[in-house]
Image: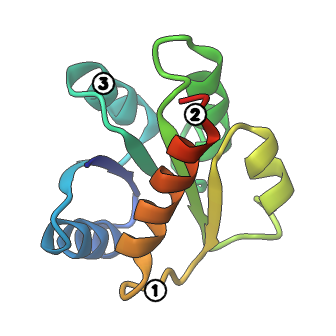
Amino acid sequence: MKILVVEDQPAELKLAVHVLSAAGFEVDQAVAAEQAIAAIKEDRPQIILLDLSLPGVDGLTLARKLKADPSTREILIVAITSYPERFPMAEALAAGCDAYLPKPVSTRTLPETLRTVMKNAEGDGDR
């Protein structure tokens, strides 16, 4: 499974990439929304692990843009945030995110969480 990790904090980005790569995922990375869009066009992921607090264009805006575009709306988005009061779960889901994880995200359960999101989406029959 190909995953794009969009995270602007270097330590958190490195950790997520390491954990997911070690779990057998093919991982690409981006530190901002514009870089994420370029990465998606270059090599489309099946799932995006998206930090909602990004510099410039925030993760909710990026999620809305991806879900509004027919060429990217089927990509699953798992929102992550350190600021649930600023980026509440209901708002993330309304923006089109398929799942929501508050930080700190458990590195032990992250790979299985992403597999579960993918499995649930496949079970919906609309992907």
Disc 3/disc 1 C-alpha distance (Å)? 28 Å
Comparing 59 with 75, the one in front is 75
For the point 55% across and 23% down, which residue is it?
Answer: 73
Give 55 or 5, whichever is nearer the viewer: 5
Q: Residues within 10 Å of mark 2 (few under 14, many from 20)?
A: many
**Residue at image mark 1:** 106
Q: Alpha-carbon distance for marks 2 and 3? A: 12 Å
Q: Residue at x 54, y 39 (%)?
A: 56
* Kind of residue at disc 2: Leu
What kind of colouring is applied to the model shown?
Answer: rainbow
Which kind of residue does numbered mark 3 sit on?
Ala
Residue beneath label 3, please? 38
Q: Residue at x 43, y 83 (%)?
A: 109
In this rendering, position of residue 90 left or right of residue 6: right
Residue located beneath label 2 in the image: 62
Secondary structure category for the residue under label 3: helix
- Numbered disc 1: secondary structure: loop
Mark 3: give few (<14), some (14-19) or many (20+) Cα within 10 Å: few
The amino acid type of the residue labelled 1 equals Ser
Lower position in the chain sequence, tag 3 or tag 1: 3
Name the quadrant containing residue 108. Answer: bottom left
Earlier sequence position, callout 2 versus callout 3: 3
Taking 36 as reference, is 37 above or below it?
above
- In which image quadrant can residue 124 be found? top right
Percent coordinates x, y for residue 33 in the rendering: 45, 36
- Is residue 61 shown left or right of residue 74? right
Query: Mark 1 to mark 2: distance in Å?
Result: 24 Å
Residue 37 in the image: above or below residue 7: above
User: Looking at the picture, how far across and down is residue 71, in whole percent?
Assistant: 46, 12
